[in-house]
Amino acid sequence: MPKRNKIIYWISTAWLALGMLSTGALQLFRAKAEGALAPPRVYGITHLGYPVYFLTILGIWKLSGVVALLVPEFPLLKEWAYAGFFFAMSGAVFSHIASGDPVKEIFPSLLLLILTVISWYFRPADRKIIAVNPYSHGQEFPKTATATEKHGNHAAVA
């Protein structure tokens, strides 16, 4: 992995982890974020049309995802964490858009979404899932006989 890619990966992953850790903790403990309309405030989550208990779920998911991203090994768990972050942040972006919120309220979710994609794209090989399917690397599938070829019923084809 080139040094430039490694630097991009670690900077984006550190910012992503800090963002998810801070918002996840605020959501889990339902702390008030001064001056913020957007979640993690209780008003923010209800403004978007979600129940208040959703803050606890999001907080647990985000904190668990941060642990999964930063702990070595477990590449499948990392893929799930990236997917969860992507779904949560894209959902937040579209929830703010649907609620008619101004761009300043969409920006934090959009930034975390972009950091998720950058971190995932530049992750090192040892943090990726290794394909075990022999056909996943551009190899051709073996030719199998169709039902009519197996049973010699060529008249049914015509």
Image (tube, rainbow, N blue to C red):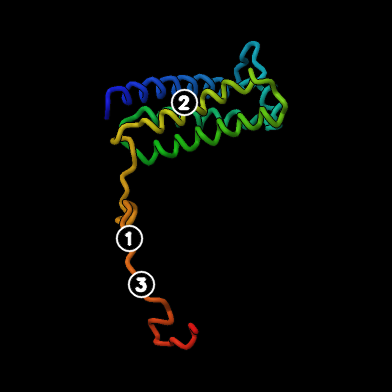
Q: Earlier in the sequence, mark 1 or mark 2?
A: 2
Residue 114 screen position, x and y as percent: 50, 27
| Left or right of 95 in this view: 59 | left
Q: Please state which amino acid type lies under the numbered disc 2.
A: Leu
Q: Secondary structure at mark 3?
A: loop
On residue 144, the disc is 3
Q: Earlier in the sequence, mark 3 or mark 2?
A: 2
Q: Which residue is mark 1?
A: 140
Q: Please state which amino acid type lies under the numbered disc 3.
A: Thr
Contact between marks 3 and 1 (CB within 8 A): the answer is no
Q: Secondary structure at mark 1?
A: loop
Residue 49 screen position, x and y as percent: 71, 32
- Answer yes or no: is residue 52 visible: yes
- Distance, label 1 to label 2, CA atoms, is 36 Å
Q: Quadrant of residue 51?
A: top right
Residue at image coords 43%, 87%? 153
Q: Which residue is mark 2?
A: 115
